[in-house]
Image (cartoon, rainbow, N blue to C red):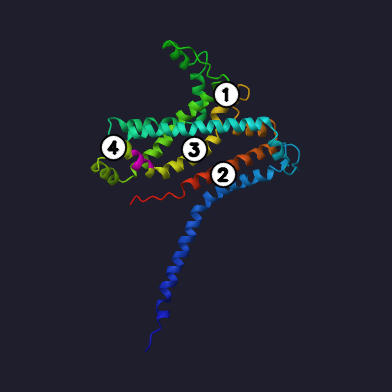
């Protein structure tokens, strides 16, 4: 009697296919809540902003279609152009200073020092604290009349500083933000450095390479993927600075700290000009998209082999 191989193997294959289909179904069911939240709170509002940027709407009357009028108005608005300049200036200072400070801290924490584990916990405390609470505390610390900072400067024989003047307000916001977020970037850099295989450092030690050469030729090149992640998230986060500006300076004095995110908030909820605020948000989205693509272009030809 001649056996038929197809019929003999058909039941196990069908069972295997059913099991695979069932696993796929379970997988989709598990990601369904997350996908629903992303759809409801991220994707749909983003698309709504693009649509709303073509309308005039004040929450009370029905939206009226105005085409690209909101965008045309943007490029003739001196406050929008000024806010864009303030935001770019803030990003150019915030990202390099924060990551340079993080790199210095992480190189120190990579050494076998006593109490280093406790310090790794301490520097993360500002990052896990709510931004509004931190801003309120710093507003009191930097108060020109009753603040601790000016009290300490006076004890050291130094002149008092008006931390909320036009010349100093943005620097104060920058200082608070760096103090709060340096812990997170330090943590990510520390993980990146610890993932570099020890054999590279051992080979460099055998060859007699100096500490500087080890840093430039081993640590920094192999840390580039981590730095790329930090630069992308850091620049996006810096463009979205709002809590510290709103709580500490409220955009002032004058418009000296009126960053783009704060201006969008004012247009939307103070002046009820939702269409104009949406047009600003679209421009901000395009700026972040271009900067992110540029960063990927710079790093895309870099390959890494950590095996």
Lateral position of residue 167 relative to residue 152, left or right: right
Residue 114 falls in which quadrant of the image?
A: top left
Residue beneath disc 1 = 249
Instruction: Judge by depth and name the residue closer to the eye, 204 or 72.
Output: 204
In the image, is residue 199 above or below residue 107?
below
Q: Residues within 10 Å of mark 3 (few under 14, many from 20)?
A: many
Kindly report the secondary structure that dominates the magenta region of the rendered protein: helix
Mark 2 or mark 3: whose residue is earlier in sequence:
3
| Residue on which the image places disc 3 | 234
Tell me whether circle 2 and circle 3 mark residues in contact (CB < 8 Å): no
**Reading the chain from its start, which is encountered first: label 4 or label 3?**
4
Looking at the rendered structure, which numbered label has been put on residue 290?
Answer: 2
Q: Is the residue under label 4 in contact with that under label 1 (CB below 8 Å)?
A: no
How far apart are the alpha carbons under marks 2 and 3? 15 Å
Mark toward the start of the polypeptide (2 vs 1):
1
Residue 113: x %, y % from top left: 28, 31
- Location of mark 4 (residue): 210
**Do residues under tags 4 and 2 come within 8 Å of each other at their CB atoms?**
no
Name which residue lies at 37% across and 38% down: 190
Of labels 1 and 3, earlier in sequence is 3
Boundaries of the magenta span: 215-220
Q: Confirm whether residue 73 shows in the render.
A: yes
How far is the residue under mark 4 from the one under mark 2? 39 Å
Q: For the residues marked 1 and 4, what is the alpha-carbon distance in whole angstroms?
A: 47 Å
Q: Is residue 124 visible?
A: no
Question: Which secondary structure, mark 3?
Answer: helix
State yes or no: discs 1 and 3 in contact (Cβ < 8 Å).
no
């Amino acid at each position: 009697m001649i056996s038929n191989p197809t019929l003999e193997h058909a039941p196990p294959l069908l069972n295997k296919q059913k099991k695979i289909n069932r696993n796929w179904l379970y997988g989709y069911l598990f990601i369904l809540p997350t996908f629903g939240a992303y759809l409801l709170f991220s994707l749909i509002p983003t698309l709504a902003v693009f649509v709303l940027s073509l309308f005039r709407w004040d929450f009370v009357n029905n939206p009226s279609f105005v085409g690209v009028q909101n965008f045309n108005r943007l490029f003739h608005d001196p406050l929008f152009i000024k806010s864009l300049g303030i935001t770019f200036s803030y990003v150019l200072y915030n990202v390099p200073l924060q990551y340079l400070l993080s790199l210095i801290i992480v190189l120190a924490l990579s050494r076998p020092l006593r109490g280093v584990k406790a310090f790794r916990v301490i520097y993360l405390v500002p990052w896990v604290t709510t931004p509004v609470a931190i801003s309120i505390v710093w507003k009191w610390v930097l108060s020109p009349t009753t603040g601790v900072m000016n009290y300490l400067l006076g004890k050291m024989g130094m002149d008092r500083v008006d931390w909320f003047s036009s010349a100093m307000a943005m620097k104060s916001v920058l200082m608070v933000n760096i103090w709060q977020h340096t812990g997170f970037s330090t943590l990510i850099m520390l993980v990146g450095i610890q993932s570099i295989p020890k054999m590279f450092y051992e080979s460099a030690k055998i060859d007699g390479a100096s500490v500087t050469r080890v840093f430039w030729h081993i640590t920094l090149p192999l840390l580039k993927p981590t730095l790329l992640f930090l630069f992308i998230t850091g620049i996006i986060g810096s463009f979205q600075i709002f809590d510290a500006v709103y709580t500490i300076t409220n955009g002032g004095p004058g418009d000296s700290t009126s960053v783009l995110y704060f201006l969008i908030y004012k247009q939307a909820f103070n002046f009820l000009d939702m269409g104009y605020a949406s047009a600003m948000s679209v421009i901000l989205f395009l700026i972040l998209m271009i900067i992110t693509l540029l960063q990927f272009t710079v790093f895309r030809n870099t390959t890494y082999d950590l095996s």
